Amino acid sequence: MSKDLGNYRKSYIKGELVEENLPSNPMDLFNSWFSNVDSKKIEIEPNAMSLSTVGPDKYPGTRIVLLKKITKDGFVFFSNYDSTKGISISNNNRVCLSFFWSSQEQQVIVKGNASKINDLESTEYFNSRPIGSKIGAVVSNQSQIIPSREYLEKKYEFIKSKKINIKKPKNWGGYLVAPISYEFWQGRDNRLHDRILYQKNNNLWDFKRLSP
């Protein structure tokens, strides 16, 4: 089966990126964009982002994860450390994040280095999660082959029936992605999109415009 998608087109008219209005720190622009998207309550999960890693086999892998904290140092998400992405990061901590907010015709690409956050912070976040999510983290040996869905659900129900305090697994926690570059993309008419690339230079950020 084949399907021609050549006639799928959309004009982008929602905004623009003008150099004179850009902040010196790209995190300020990210926070501005994110706050705007979040306030409009149009995107189902504005904190959803693609996370790209390179595995031991040298192939890239991408999946959607949820951004859980924005700090002055970067972006925090949580995962099983023994998952495919966790193993990839342990071998090569250079990662790429991508946010796409279709309602605002905006995309942000962040390249950076991922590192584990401290265990106390991971525990505090784990303890704030709903009980079902806590149990899920305990019963799932993420990325491992399992015999069936029923096998997973039985493990879940077994833990749930014990009605015990669920503690954070040792192999579960957060990562901080410390950015080395940001690319901001704003859709424009006639495919003449705005692209602004921020890069660090001697611990300061500078930016340049890229051709669309």
Image (cartoon, rainbow, N blue to C red):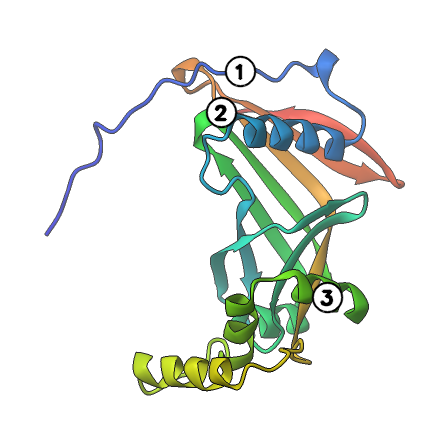
**Residue 159 appears at what percent x and percent y?**
50, 84
Do callouts 2 and 1 mark residues in contact (Cβ within 8 Å)? yes
Q: Which residue is mark 2?
A: 104
Q: Pick out the residue farthest to the left.
A: 1
Mark positioned earlier in the residue sequence (2 or 3): 2
Q: Is residue 14 left or right of residue 147?
A: right
Label 1 sits on a secondary structure element that is: loop
Q: Position of residue 206 (x, y in %)?
A: 79, 30
Q: Amino acid at mark 3?
A: Ser
| Relative depth, front residue between 83 and 87 | 83
Label 2 to label 1: alpha-carbon separation: 8 Å
**Drawn side of residue 202 relative to residue 182, left or right:** right
Question: Is 143 located above or below residue 117 in the figure?
Answer: below
The kind of secondary structure element at disc 2 is: helix
| Type of amino acid under label 2 | Gln
Q: Quadrant of residue 91?
A: bottom right
Asked if labels 3 and 2 touch by Cβ distance under 8 angstroms, the answer is: no
Name the quadrant containing residue 205: top right
Q: Earlier in the sequence, mark 3 or mark 1?
A: 1
Q: Is residue 1 left or right of residue 146?
A: left
Is residue 90 visible to the viewer in this orientation of the structure? yes
- Asked if disc 3 and disc 1 are in contact, CB closer than 8 Å, the reply is no
61 versus 81 height, above or below: above
Q: Residues within 10 Å of mark 1 (few under 14, many from 20)?
A: some
At a point 53% along the width and 86% down the height, the residue shown is 162
Percent x, y of residue 200: 80, 39
What is the number of the mark on residue 122? 3
Residue at image mark 1: 15
| Residue 186, label in figure | none
Give the mark, 2 or 1, whose residue is nearer the N terminus: 1
Residue at the image position 54 percent from the left and 56 percent from the top: 52
Q: CA distance from mark 3 to mark 1?
A: 37 Å
